[in-house]
Amino acid sequence: MNRFLSFAFLFLLTSSVAAQKWPTPYELSGKKRTATYDECVSWYQNLQKAFPKISSFESIGLSDDGSPIYVFRIHGENATDKIKLLINNNIHPGEPEGTDASMLFCRDLLMNKNRLKEWQSIDIHVVCQYNVDGTRNQSCCTRANQNGPENQGFRGNARNLDLNRDFIKADSRNARAFATYFSKHKFDFFIDNHTSNGADYQYVLTYFHTRPEKLAIPLNRMIGRVDSSLKRDLLSKGWPTSPYVETMKAIPDSGIHAFWETGRYATGYAALHHCMGFTVETHMLKPFDQRVDATLAFLNAFNLAIMPLKSEVADFARRVKWIGNRRPAQKAQWEMLNYSLDEKRFDTFTFLGFEHGYKTSEVTGLPRLYYDRNRPWAHPIKYYKYFNSTDSALIPRYYVIPYAWAEVRERLAMNGIEYKLLSTDTTLTMRMSYITGFETAKSPYEGHYLHHSIQTRDTLLPIPVKTGAWLVPVNQSNVKFLAAVLEPRAPDSYFAWNFFDAIVQQKEWFSDYVWADKAEEILKNDAKLKKQFEEKRNADKDFSSNAWAQWEWIYKHSSYYEKTHRLYPIGRVD
């Protein structure tokens, strides 16, 4: 028997013994059901008691319904100088493969002493069921497009929030607990387990990873090596994979495109902390047991892929720590804020799909799409994975956060942002932004009327700064996070998420019968302003026929107009 077969036989034998000693609720159900919250907690508690020296089980905080969010950790006897991996499950509880696969993964690893010894370079943290509230809200039928399991959780948490849109705004207790834990441990790799929606095709397993445009060059190289290793290993084990299927049109034949994950999403958030993120998407229509097996195969392949990177990860961590501890830079720097998909550039790869067609619906009497699983195909399709930067921002040496904006300061703190408190009142000449334009969603999105297409104008202003304000140096490890949340034009900035909406509302006005005399006096005493006013009246017929518009124009160009209207309150010291 060769070495590989011996290892495989030993692994299967160990797994069989482990299954008999610590069967999971998934296995006990005949692979039909996923573990409930109480079952999951009890099972991990028992597993940890059996391996107290090399594992731990702790709550990282409460969910919005007041239940503990638990993390199971396999740290070995020496928990220092390791690759740190975080595995997240049940962010969408109707997509629970990660819960059951992670239980199998942890159990089989701990039971196999030889395998565990080989994996001592990895510190593994497993968020057992992140959306506890949605996990407890179970029924048979929350996922209309999905093939099992028999019990399915609900995507919304106790506040009906989708937690995979909440990482930046952190409306939920879940997100605040996650951010605190994430920033504390400074993870190197992150896996978020999901089930897909969308087209039909042959693959059980698809996935995507953090866009390379978001990562430092050393991490970009590492994530490419991990991706290549994953594909080879999974294919050799009988799990061909594809990039996550986001179709250009209705069907995969039209081509697929990479998913751009901003900071509201799990892997987008991870990238802002120099963490390489992977999102697993098993196919919704494949049997539940196949989806669990595929997720387990991914976890095994992933850990094998990252083991050789221990020294490179450590070198990068030391570099980031040095940047965070050195003196502030003397020059500002640029960070990219927005990107758009390049629809002219693409790669091709052989995709495993099904023939599709259209037939008349018996319900509507109109054409409907269907896939014919009896007619599989394999041929090249286009994969659009290139993005172009559309906006960037000059990042200062320091941001100044006024004391008044407590919700912003709280979120920066939970994400590990370092700062200094100003101990005296002072006036700083800072680069400030005026919000000159934006559009707002017409209906609420995850509890907010999200702003987009944001435009700004920068100017230098002397700004009084009160005691208790934060002086935030950007030369720390989380500079990408700072730019993503504090630069207002960024798609997931705190301004976009409505944290600063009060500044866009004008507070003081005038009565026209009073202002008429003052406006006349202002124009008499300011020849330049009067000339600009007359030019606008002559060029704009609507303006010249609208008395209120003329009063307002003069008011906004006078010393009476409040200078803080649309003045973004976060200052920049360049």
Image (tube, grey):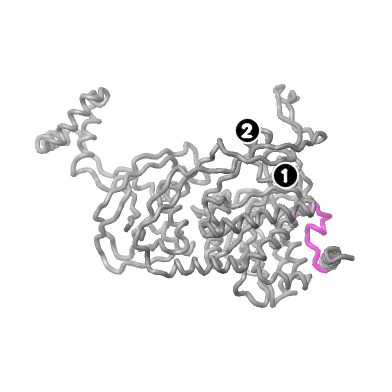
Queried whether the magenta region covers residue 20, the answer comes back as: yes
- Above or below, 215 relative to 186: above
* Residue 214 percent across, percent down from the top left: 52, 52
Report the side of 169 relative to 471 (left or right): right
Q: Residue at x 30, y 65 (%)?
A: 467
- From this viewpoint, is residue 132 visible? no
Residue 466: mark in rendering? none
Does 542 sit above or below residue 201?
A: above
Which residue lies most toward the right here? Answer: 1
Q: How many marks?
A: 2
Q: What amino acid is labelled 1 in the image?
A: Met
Going from N to C along the chain, the mark reached first, 1 or 2, is 2
**Residue 359 x, y percent position in the rendering:** 75, 25
User: Which of the image's four quarters has the N terminus?
Assistant: bottom right
Residue range corresponding to the magenta coloring: 19-34
Q: Quadrant of the C terminus?
A: bottom left
Was residue 411 drawn as part of the magenta stretch in this picture?
no
Task: Give the quadrant of residue 381.
Answer: top right
Percent x, y of residue 399 = 36, 58
Using the numbered discs, state the Cα–Cα distance from disc 1 to disc 2 in whole angstroms: 19 Å
The answer, for residue 145, to whether it is visible in the render is yes
Q: Is residue 354 above or below residue 268?
A: above
Q: Which residue is mark 2?
A: 249
Query: Local crowd at mark 1 within 10 Å, few (<14), some, or many (≥20)?
Result: many
Estimate the x, y position of residue 97 in percent, counting from the top left.
72, 53
Q: Choose top left, top right, bottom left or bottom right for residue 396.
A: bottom left
> What residue is shown with label 1?
284
Task: Sort mark 2 into few (<14), some (14-19) or many (20+) by Cα contacts within 10 Å.
Answer: few
Q: Callout 1: helix, strand or loop?
A: loop
Q: Amino acid at mark 2?
A: Lys
